[in-house]
Amino acid sequence: MNLVSLSEVLKSAEDGGYAVGAFNANNLEIVQAIIESAVEERSPVILQASQGAIKYAGLEYIVSMVRTAAGNAGVPVVLHLDHGTDFAQVMRCIRHGFSSVMFDGSALPLEENVAITRNVVEIAAAVGISVEGELGKIGGTEDEISVEEKDAFFTDPAEAERFVNETGIDALAVAIGTAHGPYKGKKPEIDFPRLERIRELTGIPIVMHGASGVPDEDIRKGIQLGVRKINIDTDIRQAFTKGLHEFIRANPDNIDPRKMLAPAKKEMKEIVKSKMRLFGCCGKA
């Protein structure tokens, strides 16, 4: 199966009242773990590459790995640029075959964010590619993007309505209390009334960033209120590290990277599958 657009899988999610998992990948084993999980669970899946992942693995390698995996999967697969803050980087991803891109202009003044996002949408729409935008700053750190807690601010519903109307984006990432990276101390406090109001005013699929570590009951409530794309990265990194560390501790003389990475892949698959079941997208492919 060829790659599909984000809007295609989110339309089905909207009709079915579930969310689709968006999982970040940096190398072959992570790509395999995500795709194999989607196939085994018969789930649509969004595979994301951040700017950091592209810098690490190379744009051509990322696209080639995901296209190969998607071609043999038999389930809908989206290749999505996560947190593209550079217009030129977004254009490179479009040219190289991503089926969806995110332009993250949340650090810019509203007028500038609107103008650049609208430009990205016009270009992407001409070639059938979906666009995710962001309004409000999501705290924490993800690759090259870091937002201190004191600088994070929640998405304003009225601004969200204007932003969506003036840009024509397919999905909106909002700041409602989640954060990138591991949560420190108490669990995140999600502003559900704000989420509900944003959804009422915009009417488009909402994206929850920083969902690793968010309690299951909060994920379910978010889906009920219109969250249709949920980003998972930290949980995958932790699963990878757990599998790798446990194997090396038990097999200190091993020098075969294939044997080291097999348990890491197994741990990642367990996490990805559990998230797919939580999101309600299993059996929807």
Image (cartoon, rainbow, N blue to C red):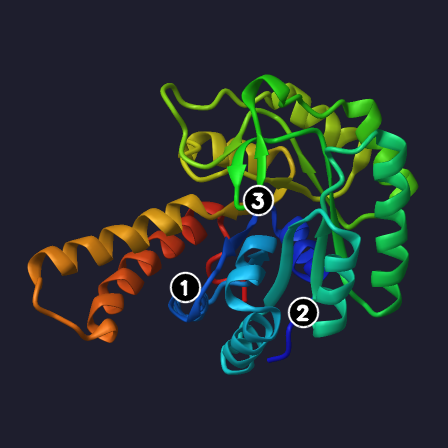
Residue contact between numbered discs 3 and 1, judged by CB atoms under 8 Å: no
Q: Is mark 3 on a helix, strand or loop?
A: loop
x, y (%) of residue 238?
A: 33, 47
- Residue with the mark numbered 3: 144
Q: Can residue 153 be seen in this view?
A: yes
Which residue: 44% across, 71% down?
A: 39
Question: Which of the numbered marks, if any, corresponds to residue 30?
Answer: 1
Residue 192 falls left or right of residue 132: left
Type of residue at label 2?
Val
Residue 151: percent from the left, percent from the top?
63, 21
Residue occupying image coordinates x 60% and y 46%: 17
Q: In this view, does 281 lie above or below 2?
A: above
Location of the N terminus (image quadrant): bottom right
Find the distance from the CA under tag 3 to the CA under tag 1.
Answer: 20 Å
Q: Judge depth for marks 1 and 2 and give the one in front.
A: 1
Q: Position of residue 199 (x, y in %)?
A: 73, 32
**Number of numbered discs visible in the structure rendering:** 3
| SS for callout 1 | helix
Query: What residue would you read off at disc 2?
Result: 4
Q: Could you tell me how far apart the alpha carbons at marks 3 and 2 are, in whole angstroms?
A: 27 Å
51 on left or right of 254: right
Please give the name of the residue rendered at 77% of the width and 50% of the height, measured from the top-left corner. Answer: 170
Q: Which of marks 3 and 2 is nearer the N terminus?
A: 2
Who is closer to the viewer here, 35 or 27? Answer: 27
Q: Looking at the picture, which amino acid does disc 1 mark?
A: Ile
Sequence-earlier tag: 1 or 2: 2
